[in-house]
Image (spheres, rainbow, N blue to C red):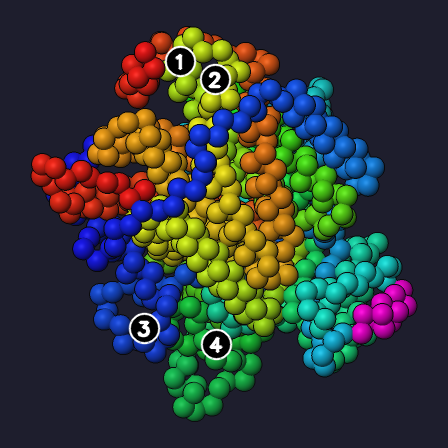
Amino acid sequence: MRFIPNFRGFDFFPHDLRLPFMRYKGLCLALSLIAMALSLAVILQRGFNYGVDFTGGSVIEVQSKTGAADIAGLREKLNQLGVGSVQIQSFGTPSDVLIRVEQQKGGEAEQKAAIAKVTEALGAQYEQRRFESVGPAVSGELRWTGFKAVVAGLLAICAYVWLRFEWQFAAGAIVALTHDVLLVAGIFSFLQLEFDLSIVAALLTILGYSVNDTVVVSDRIRENLRKYKKMELNALLDLSINETLSRTILTGCTAIAVLLALYIFGGEVIRNFNLAMLLGVVIGTYSSIFIGAPLLGYLGVKRDWTGAPTPAAPGAAQRRARAA
Amino acid sequence: MLNFPRWKQAAIIITCLVGLFMVLPNFLSQQALDKWPRWLPKGQLSLGLDLRGGAHLLYAMELDDVRKDWLDSLRDDARRRLRDAKIAVSAVGISGQTVQVRLARPEDADAALKALRQMIQPLGNPLMGGSGTDIDVQKEGADTFTIAPTEAGLKHRIGNAVDAAIETVRRRVDAVGTKEPHIVREGEGRILVQVPGLQDTAELERLIGETARLSFHEVHPSVTPAEAKAGRVPVGFKIYQGADKREGEYLLRETPVVRGDELSDAGPGFHPQTTQPIVHFSFNNSGARKFGKFTRDHVGKPFAIVLDDKVISAPEIRSAIEGGSGYIEGNFTPETSTKLAIQLRSGALPAKLTIAEKRTVGPSLGNDSIEAGKLAGVIGGLATIVLTILYYGTFGIFACIGLVVHGALTVALMSLFGSALTLPGIAGLVLGIAMAVDANVLIYERIREEVRNGKSPVAAIDAGFTRAFVTIADSQLTTLACAIVMFWLGAGPIRGFAVTLTIGICTSIFASVTVVRLLIYYWLNAQPRGKGTRLALPV
């Protein structure tokens, strides 16, 4: 222990801040609802730019051996092969190209033939770095599995929250989580970013992170409900959010810092994944403050927790003593 | 709470050290590892195909083939049994998913039902409480019967077909000489083949697609392989190698007696008298005729079962095998007899395999991804460490030590479970780190709050850990619930992610709560005590 210097950290968080979140709870909920409706509308109208995981077809990532790749030239050349539309996009650096060949009618053999044509047309100038091909049966299944996983994740979380807290908390959590997932999905749909299996993983992670945030706030609400039996509910919710605000923001900042590093330096293959996570952390932090708790304000909550096993709360007694 | 018994301290420190030791090999080059003392762990974290490069092929089996084959053999079986029972039939055929039998004379109905019911096989091990039967035999009218595969029976059949196919695929992948192929069953009727380091899959796909060659050969009655090698190989004979662990060579007639495509079934069993493990097999009609004749002429002599030019078994013919079915006796254990049965069944693929999904990653991309992941990890890690130490001072350093332990234990557990690190797995690791940091933030913020509320430093630390732990447990458990769902429902990349996340959650509770608490305990003990000195918390 002698080798570790003894020094204080900077507690730069203004702990006296008592932000009146609950005063704006109607506005927050309305805004969130509008955002959710907008997301849903965008998703229904524009749909997703599904990756090969979900549509079937093939993706070839190639790297030009001679500097920058000639994307326009490739586009022209490959679209004349008669293998349907071939999408070509730059991928990270100028020399990296992503080629997407749609699912051929007629099955595996045709798909193989189409890929052979494309590979031949590419010639020796390009090095093949990655190849992915997903058949129609598997892609349909993956889409269904992905959807199932997100919904089951949501339900599992709600069941847990319900078990540990009250149904009002679970209701708040499910609205907040649906909000997060819907918004991130909506942004992906709006920007037409590729939506593949890894994005489903990101959505599940967002669920995990956001519920983590919501649970921390809920935990404090429950604790305060036991501590201040007479406090007005909105004031109590405000107090709980404010008390946990420093941790919400600090943890959020750390997560964002790490994800930003991954987004910028983590490479092209998981860039969309990291973007989804970044968006999810920001939106998830917002939702745990502005959706979960305000909803409790509307739903009301059981005030008498005396039956529940309560840890002794000497802090409260002290504070009350001081106030008196 | 701030009391740590000695054994607890020791247990925590030993766990940390073991974790660090297990991670150490990951930072050493292969040369350094070779000089590593033998008692130290050598396992390195294995990398997923997306990081090291390699091929991932998902094959789907044509389940309709399996179903149709089975109905065919049920029909043949029914016909044979009724003939053996001397019951005349007017029609035996397949209609939809059932076999329909119509008798010529309705008065045979009872005898026919008895004969047909003998086809029913119990499923599962009867000792373990069997689970139903493979088929249903129903009397429909006065003279009509339906034989219908049950749901469980079909599942069992498909399972057998997939097991057989896996055995075949494994042998063929091994034949390419690839290192550490990973071949597993996935879902119903799917086989996943992963071959690290392989990018051009054309050869592999061709090999898996082709049909295997299984055959039964005559062994030369007098000349030994050694003699043949020294002198001259008799005309029409050839020297064959033993497969796998079967040593030795065999001098066999090159033209087989029967080919494997004439084998209709094989299964493990026990000899009724000696109770030794045996392997049953049966041929189709033409195979049965050829094999019957051959065994009649060669009683007491060995014959050889050859798979892809390797001798897998050379049993002795005890008696003539008429009627197309017999069994192989040998020095089998229940395991080896099952394996041989699977090999016999899998000689040819039981059903067509088509590629449902194929992913290959070249080594250069894999390397780029590793480099990118490392860079992002270092920068993200540094950002976390700087932020934490800046905000929490000395206690921030403890949190960082906890983080290092967390990282080490996560990697150590991953190597222990043999789960590979994939690109989404890196993201899972990062999320695990975020959760670990969160645990410390929760604790420290709580301590600060308690201090602001006027608690003494020791009491504040005590309350911080106790109170925050409820929250930490709640938040980690909900995330764990999510991770379990991902593992259960997810495929491929989602699974890798779920595994790392789960491990990360488990280690973060130990590293960020227990280890940090121990560090703070040591720190408290190192502080000057006595009257007049007021303990100041460096948070």
Residue flagged by tag 2: what amino acid is it?
Leu
Q: CA distance from mark 3 to mark 1?
A: 61 Å
Nearest the eye: A265 or A102? A265
Q: CA distance from mark 3 to mark 2?
A: 59 Å
Q: Chain of mark 1?
A: A
What segment carries the magenta color?
A70-82
Are discs 1 and 4 both within one chain? no
Whether tag 1 and tag 4 are in contact, CB under 8 A, the answer is no
Q: Which residue is mark 2?
A: A236
Q: Residues within 10 Å of mark 4 (few under 14, many from 20)?
A: some
- Does label 1 or label 2 sit earlier along the sequence? 1
Whether residue B503 is visible to the viewer of this picture, yes or no, is no
Q: Chain of mark 2?
A: A
Distance between mark 4 and mark 2 Cα atoms: 84 Å
Q: Is residue A296 left or right of residue A320?
A: right
Which one is in front in this view, the residue at disc 1 or the one at disc 4? 1
Q: Are marks 4 and 2 in contact (CB under 8 Å)?
A: no
